[in-house]
Image: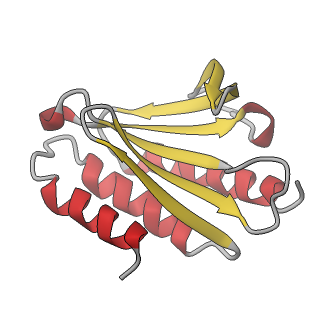
Amino acid sequence: MSNFETELEEFLNGWTQDAQGNKAGFLRLKNYLSAKPEVKLSFNARPGVTYSLRAVHEKQKEKSLFVMVDVIDDDPEERWLSICFYGEMITDPEEKGDFVPEGLVGEDAHCFDIEESNDEELAYVEARLDEAHQTASKS
């Protein structure tokens, strides 16, 4: 098992409080990204702050990732998700996200916060993942 898989498994095994369904939401997005061609995932654990799943397209040259799926850990009993993209990599036709100046590795970002996972919000984010994946394959 790789270091990435070990750290991720340890995090997931320790995530026991989840009234908001965000563990299932996080796993859904992780599996969605894992199924995409030419995507490499990494995981960065900062307990008490965030747990970050990062995806990079193998053809990407200009940026170090195309999405960061964060589990915000300021309250372990009420963790929530923040999914951030570089601003120019996606659209937001329903204006569900927030513009965050310098919010992703020092660059302008578009972030979607999910406090309670549901199919509609996750499907909307998955559509943004598709866009970012496509854009990243050309950058």
Q: Residue at x 84, y 56 (%)?
A: 61
- Comparing 23 with 74, the one in front is 74
Residue at 31%, 63% (x, y): give it: 7
- The quarter holding residue 30 reads bottom left
Outermost residue, bottom side: 1
Quadrant hosting residue 126: bottom right
Asked if residue 71 lies left or right of residue 62, the reply is left
| Residue 124 visible (yes or no) | no
Res. 106 image quadrant = top right
* Visible residue check, residue 39: yes
Above or below, 123 against 40 in this view is above
The total number of labels drawn is 0
Seen from the viewer's position, the closer of residues 48 and 70 is 48
Q: Which residue is farthest front?
A: 3
Q: Position of residue 40 (x, y in %)?
A: 61, 68
Q: Residue 100, image x and y in percent? A: 62, 19
> Above or below — where is 104 with respect to 19?
above
Please state if 37 lies on the left or on the right of 137 as rendered. left
Seen as rendered, the residue at the extreme right is: 138
The quadrant of the image that shows the C terminus is: bottom right
- Where, quadrant-wise, is the N terminus in this rendering? bottom left
Q: Could you say where residue 90 lies in the image, as x and y percent from the top left?
A: 74, 41
Instruction: Identify the residue shown where x is 27% and y is 67%.
Output: 9
Residue 113 image point, x, y percent: 44, 31
Residue at image location 56% in from the left, 75% down from the top: 35
Q: Above or below — where is 73 with respect to 18?
A: above
Depth check: 63 or 124 in front? 63
Name the colour scheme. Answer: secondary structure
